[in-house]
Structures are given as C-alpha cells and as structure tokens.
Image: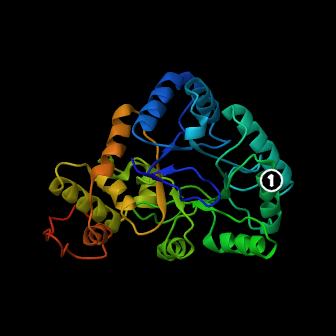
Amino acid sequence: MKNKEIVAGVDKPVSQLALGTVSYSLANKERSFSLLDDFVTAGGTAIDTARCYGESEDVIGLWMESRANRERIFLITKGGLSRHDSCRLAVEGIEEKIESDLTESLQRLRTDYVDLYFLHRDTEEIPVARMVDCLNKELRRGRIRAFGGSNWEPRRVDEANEYAHKRGLTGFAAVSNNLSLAVPTGPYYRGLVSVDDAGRRWHVQTGIPLFSWSSQARGFFSGRFRPDVRTNANMVRVYYTDENFERLRRATLLGQRKGGYSATQVALAYLLHLRLPLVPIVGPLTEDELASCLGALQIKLTHPEVQWLNLEAREIVSPVAVSVAPDLPTVAQ
C-alpha cells in the first residue's frame, strides 16, 4: 500500500486507505486485533475512530500498546458532539466539550496525542472562531497534530480558515465527508454531508484532503441490494435510483473485464483514481472483507473508465470500448 504525507502539519505518511473501526468492541477484541494487524502488514497507517464509537478507542489503545507501534500509526479520532443530540456539536460549552472529549479519547487510546482530530459534526450557530481558537489551543498543548471537520460544508471550512489566516492561527487541514461511486439522494442520517461536484472541485482547488466515509456506499455494490429487494428502508431512500443501479451494472461489468474483480472492489478503485486528494475509509468486518478492500488497490482504471463508471460517458472510448450490457430492472418508484 502506498503512503504519502498529505495532511498539513503532520510529517507522517498516510496510507491509501484508512481503516474504519466503528464496529470494534472489547468483546471482539481478538478479531479486531487481527484486522488491525493485517491492515498494518499490508502497509496501512491510517486508523479512524471516534469518541462516540463505543469501545473502539479502547481496543485501538490496547492494540497499539501491545504492538508498541504508536509512532507508525496515523491516528484519527473525532469529538465534540452534544450530549443531547448526536447529530450536532455541543452549542453550550463547545470548548469544554472538545477538551473533555479529547482528554477521554487520549486516555482510552493510551497515547498523549492524536495525529488528526475531527470535529464530528457542525452546528452553524457556533461561530467558527470559537472552534478554531479552541483547537489551536490543543495544537499548542501538543495533544493534536492537525484538525479538521467531519460532515462540514466547504463554505464553513473556508470561513474557519479565513478566520485562522487573519489571526495567524492554524486552520482546518482535512475534511471527512461522504463520497462513493453511488450518489445519495439525501443524508442517511440527519446532519451528514456528502461531496457533490462543487465539493470535488473545492478539494482540488484547496488541496485539502478528503477522508471519505461510507466509501463503499454501505454495501450497495455487494450484490445484496437489487431494485426488487426493498427491506432496508434507509438504503432504498438514499441509494435506490436508476442511476445508481446503472453504476452498479457498469462496475460489475468492468470488474469482469478487468479479470474477475467484484463490483465493490471496482467502486473502491473508482475513488482511488479520482483526481483529488482522497483517502477512502473502509470498514471491513472480516479478514476476507479486508482482503477484498486491499485487492481494489491492484485495479488500474483509465480516466475514460472512471468517467464511464460515473455515467459521465455512454461508453469507454479509450483504450478499449466496452459495449453497453442489458439494463438491470428499473427501480420501482
């Protein structure tokens, strides 16, 4: 797995993929340790967690301690959520909430600093100045190396960074929003932010890296979801469109043409070939699922193939044309 330094202020390489750990718990510690070991053996460095992810931080802390590998890990965690509304930052006392969340995260992670700290959501009633000032305090204390926003609109990041620039402070170094080959019709949960075409251009123009969550669209490309299978109401509401099922069909076809890769692997490879600074977060639950994610790193896509997958072209015009296969059944509206 390739690694490079892409986060301003952190002189530590970030792997092509980040390992999501929301499912980790002390009860399944050994399985989690195995996934973490396999990820690092494959060259992975970036591990993503959050204060609200149950026991995930505890598991990662125990694992890093047992492997004595903290300095080799690009550690990401998040905090700042309201105690009363998990879809918003704490309006009252945001400074105290950030400080207390970070303190608890560091204790659970068994470390004295985090490489990248994300504010887990945004609450627009809170002036960006308060959050930038608070996070710069944590930078000076050495408890974080860089910070950013998860589920933040680019305009709010611009506002925060303009404030930081005018006062000689450090601004947001990264963003963690949703991006996948499947385009959502709306947020899966309240307060979530997905990257649209304007957002992609913003990442290119600013150079601010995107750590994309739900990079495989919550399993949409796995084969479990078809137009006639409508048991998951949220998946139906967010991803069941004719366009997304056409993307699924094309990913399936292209995977076959590339030598037997799955649609899920092609969908992940699509992100890795976008022309913007991007680190997809993947959340495999088993060694086989992790191996599938790693296998996507072997897929080489041309720019015309990337455009074709995203329905920006009717056919692949170079280097080899791919004929259009029969359509999947139309989505029932």
Q: Nearer the viewer, residue 84 or 208?
A: 208
> Residue at position x 73%, y 51% from top?
85
Residue 41: image location, x then y, percent: 41, 35
Residue 270 drawn above or below residue 154 = above
Location of residue 110 (image quadrant): top right
The color scheme shown is rainbow
Residue 40 drawn above or below residue 155 = above
Residue 288: image location, x then y, percent: 33, 34
In screen coordinates, is 233 left or right of 302?
A: right
Q: Nearer the viewer, residue 20 or 12?
A: 12
Q: Nearer the viewer, residue 108 or 12?
A: 12
The residue wearing badge 1 is: 140
Q: Nearer the viewer, residue 315 or 168?
A: 168
> Residue at position x 27%, y 54% from top?
299
Numbered-mark total: 1
Residue 124: image location, x then y, percent: 74, 67
Q: Secondary structure at mark 1?
A: helix
Whether residue 180 appears in this view of the structure is yes
Residue 234 drawn above or below residue 242 = above
> Residue at position x 22%, y 61% from top?
328
The outermost residue toward the front is 11
Whether residue 226 appears in this view of the structure is no
Judge the density around disc 1: few (<14), some (14-19), many (≥20) Cα neighbours within 10 Å: few
> Residue at position x 79%, y 61% from top?
131
Residue 23: image location, x then y, percent: 53, 36
Residue 192 drawn above or below residue 288 = below
Three-letter code, disc 1: Arg
Quarter holding the C terminus is bottom left
